[in-house]
Amino acid sequence: MSTAYTTITSKGQITLPAAARRALGLHAGQKVAVTVEDGRLIIDSPHDLHDVRARLREEAEAAGTWGTVPHAGDGWAAHVSAEHAES
């Protein structure tokens, strides 16, 4: 595919050219991954939720934020219950 150009709206939206959507197999309502690398905007079509989760974890670990947000099974509910019982 050759280079195509699009305009950013006042709301920060862009329209992906039809040729790009077809090349990536994208369709209306589909979620895509947006990444900035080396000053470039990269839009990926995630094929597997496992791949998306792995990439998010890798990015969070690199940023030092992995594990700082409570998630199911980490004992957070018990911690909150104990904290509220004390007050």
Image (cartoon, rainbow, N blue to C red):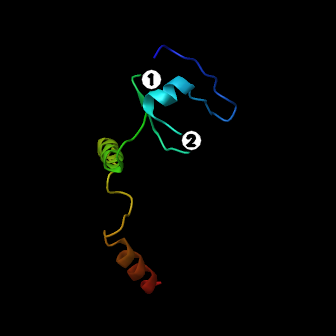
Query: In the image shown, does 61 or 55 lie closer to the viewer?
Result: 55
Residue 76 point in image, percent of width and height: 36, 71
Q: Which mark is residue 77?
A: none
Query: In the image shown, does 39 or 63 lie closer to the viewer?
Result: 39
Q: Residue furthest top?
A: 2
Query: In the image shown, does 60 or 16 lie closer to the viewer?
Result: 16
The N terminus lies in which quarter of the figure?
top left
Query: With respect to residue 29, does 41 lie above or below?
Result: above
Q: Secondary structure at mark 2?
A: loop
- Mark 1 = which residue? 40
Q: Residue at x 39, y 41 (%)?
A: 46
Residue 32 point in image, percent of width and height: 47, 40
Q: Residue at x 32, y 52 (%)?
A: 66
Q: Residue at x 44, y 23 (%)?
A: 40
Image position of 77 (left or right of 4) = left
**Mark-to-mark CA distance, 1 and 2:** 24 Å
Corner quadrant of residue 39: top left
Query: In the image shown, does 47 or 61 lie closer to the viewer?
Result: 47
Tag 2: amino acid: Ala
| Classed neighbour count for the residue bearing mark 2: other residues with Cα under 10 Å, few (<14), some (14–19), many (≥20) | few
Query: With respect to residue 70, does 15 lie above or below?
Result: above
Tag 1: amino acid: Arg
- Mark 2 = which residue? 28
Residue 82 point in image, percent of width and height: 38, 82
Q: Residue at x 61, y 30 (%)?
A: 14
Q: In this figure, what is the number of numbered marks?
A: 2
